[in-house]
Image (tube, rainbow, N blue to C red):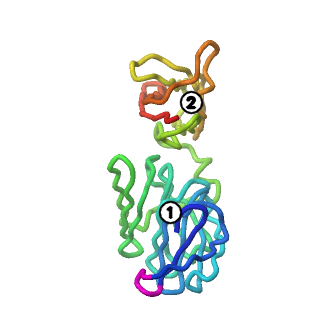
């Protein structure tokens, strides 16, 4: 399992490995089997694939997510969870035929998930984040409901990709109508550019920062550490990003 959809399998404790055809070219990051026949892999662009014959054949499932998924786990052949970029948590109760988004309460990338039964589980991620549930993950959101609902808090997400070259995406959430600014600064605190300077209504937003696309008279940025700051009303948050050429 890895880059370009590669999946490999062993039946002799790892002495030999057999390349399996996943049928996708997307990167795959996690695999979980509930028995020697039934398993799932997850990866880039919300990719989820399932096999019911030990990996001889894989077929795509519709996750409803377009974010990278980094970990998947099932407690039986029906109930499972996957987690990933920007706090994504999705759950299935019918073997992956349908997936529903759950509210993680964070925009931090989640890298691993583990459940001990259908109610109790943990997800861990960047910056030492640990989440726990004792009710199976709580409320689920179907289809676009999660994206269209108004967020309860102001949130500034970690840019992705990071490190980046030359462009990266910055997501943020606004809980009430207010003037929003997002500015980029260098290590000395000098302003590099303004990405957002306008009134935003409640909702989820995304803006691109391109280190080569700066205001007139400014050259493209050199490799290094930069900071981006969200200011929305009385809310202010700053995060670090790395340009690596």
Is 221 left, or right, of 112 in this rendering?
Answer: right
The residue indicated by pointer 2 is 177
Look at the image and give the residue range highlighted in magenta. Answer: 11-15
List x then y, in percent, for residue 202.
57, 36
Tag 1 near tag 2, CB within 8 Å:
no
For mark 1, does the 10 Å Cα neighbourhood hold few (<14), some (14 to 19), or many (20 or more) residues? many
- Secondary element under disc 1, as helix, strand or loop, is strand
As rendered, which of 45 and 218 lies closer to the eye? 218
**13 part of magenta stretch:** yes
Where residue 45 sits, quadrant-wise, is: bottom right
Instruction: Relative to 34, say whether 245 is above or below.
Output: above
List x then y, in percent, for residue 120.
36, 69
Residue 38 in sight in this render: yes
Instruction: Relative to 21, say whether 13 is above or below.
Output: below
As rendered, which of 141 and 85 lies closer to the eye? 85
Q: Earlier in the sequence, mark 1 or mark 2?
A: 1
| Mark closer to the observer (1, 2) | 1
The residue indicated by pointer 1 is 29
Residue 78 in sight in this render: no
């Amino acid at each position: 399992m890895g880059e370009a959809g590669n999946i490999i399998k062993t039946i002799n404790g790892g002495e030999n490995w057999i390349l399996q055809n996943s049928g996708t070219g997307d990167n795959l990051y996690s695999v979980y089997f509930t028995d020697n026949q039934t398993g799932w892999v997850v990866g880039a662009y919300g990719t989820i694939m399932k096999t019911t014959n030990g990996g001889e054949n894989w077929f795509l499932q519709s996750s409803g997510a377009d974010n990278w998924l980094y970990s998947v786990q099932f407690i039986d052949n029906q109930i499972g969870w996957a987690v990933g970029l920007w706090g994504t948590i999705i759950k299935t109760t019918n073997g992956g035929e349908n997936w529903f988004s759950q509210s993680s309460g964070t925009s931090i990338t989640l890298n691993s998930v583990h459940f001990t039964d259908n109610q109790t589980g943990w997800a861990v991620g960047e910056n030492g984040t640990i989440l726990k549930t004792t009710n199976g993950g709580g409320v689920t959101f179907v289809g676009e409901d999660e994206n269209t609902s108004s967020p309860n808090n102001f949130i500034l997400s970690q840019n992705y990709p990071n490190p980046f070259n030359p462009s990266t995406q910055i997501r943020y959430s606004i809980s009430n109508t207010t003037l929003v600014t997002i500015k980029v600064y260098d290590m000395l605190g000098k302003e590099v550019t303004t990405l957002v300077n306008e009134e935003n209504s409640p909702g989820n937003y995304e803006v691109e920062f391109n280190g080569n696309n700066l205001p007139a008279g400014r050259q493209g940025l050199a490799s290094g550490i930069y900071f981006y700051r969200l200011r929305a009303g009385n809310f202010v948050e700053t995060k670090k990003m790395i340009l690596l050429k």
